[in-house]
Amino acid sequence: MAASIRKRGSSGRYRPMAEINVTPLVDVMLVLLIIFMVTAPLLTTGVNLDLPRTQAAQISNPDEPLTISIRGDGQVFIQETETSVEELVPRLQAIARNKPELRIFVRGDRATNYGRMAEVLAAMIQGGFTKVALLTDPTPAAAPQPAATPARPATPPRGQPQLQPQPQPQRPARQG
C-alpha cells in the first residue's frame, strides 16, 4: 500500500511516495509459475500410450528428437500426426533434410503387436535412419509372480507308478 507523508514546513500538500510496491507483482508471478509448473508435464506427449516399464536410466540430449508412436491398435504417428508405414520413410526423409544426425525415438504401446513394431523399425532402417531408440517407462515393473504349479491328475497315465507324498520328519520343540 502506498502512503503519503506530510512534512513540516511544507506547503501543506501531500506528496505521493515515489516507491513501487512489488507485492502484487510477486503474487502474480508466483501464480503464473505454479500454472506453468502444473501444465508443462501435460504438454510433453501427444499420443496416449501405456509404455512398458524398465529399470534403464533416461537418456539426456539437448536436441529434441523426433518421436514415432505406435498405438496398441497399430496406428503410427510422427509426433502427433497420424501416418501409414508406407508414408513413414518419405515423411522422415523430408523432415531430416536439414538434420543429418536426426535422432528418432520410437514409443510403442504395451499392447502393440511385435510384428507391427518390427515392420516400423525395418522401414526406418531401410530408409537410412540409424539413430533409433526405443522408449520405455522408467519406473520399475512389478516383480513377476511365480508360476502356479500344475495340478497333478488324480490317476497317473498307464504304465507309470503312482507317486505318494513322503511324510516330513517332525523336529523336536526347542526348550529354553
Image: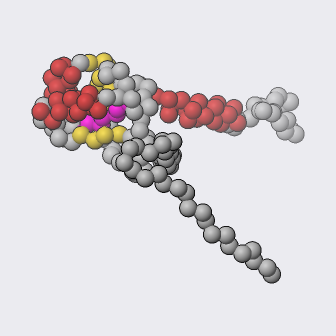
**x, y percentage for residue 103?**
25, 39
The residue under the point 17% across, 29% down is 123
The residue under the point 17% across, 26% down is 89
**x, y percentage for residue 54?**
41, 46
The residue under the point 77% across, 32% down is 2
The C terminus lies in which quarter of the figure? bottom right
State left or right for residue 6 relative to residue 53: right
- Between 123 and 162, the one lying in front of the other is 162
**x, y percentage for residue 23?**
70, 36
* Residue 73 appears in the picture as rendered: yes
The N terminus lies in which quarter of the figure? top right
| Residue 128 versus residue 146 in the image, above or below | above
- Between 94 and 21, the one lying in front of the other is 94
Q: Is residue 96 magenta?
A: no
* Residue 66 appears in the picture as rendered: no
| Residue 47 versus residue 154 in the image, above or below | above
Write the start and end of the magenta stretch as one range. 103-109
State left or right for residue 85 relative to residue 111: left
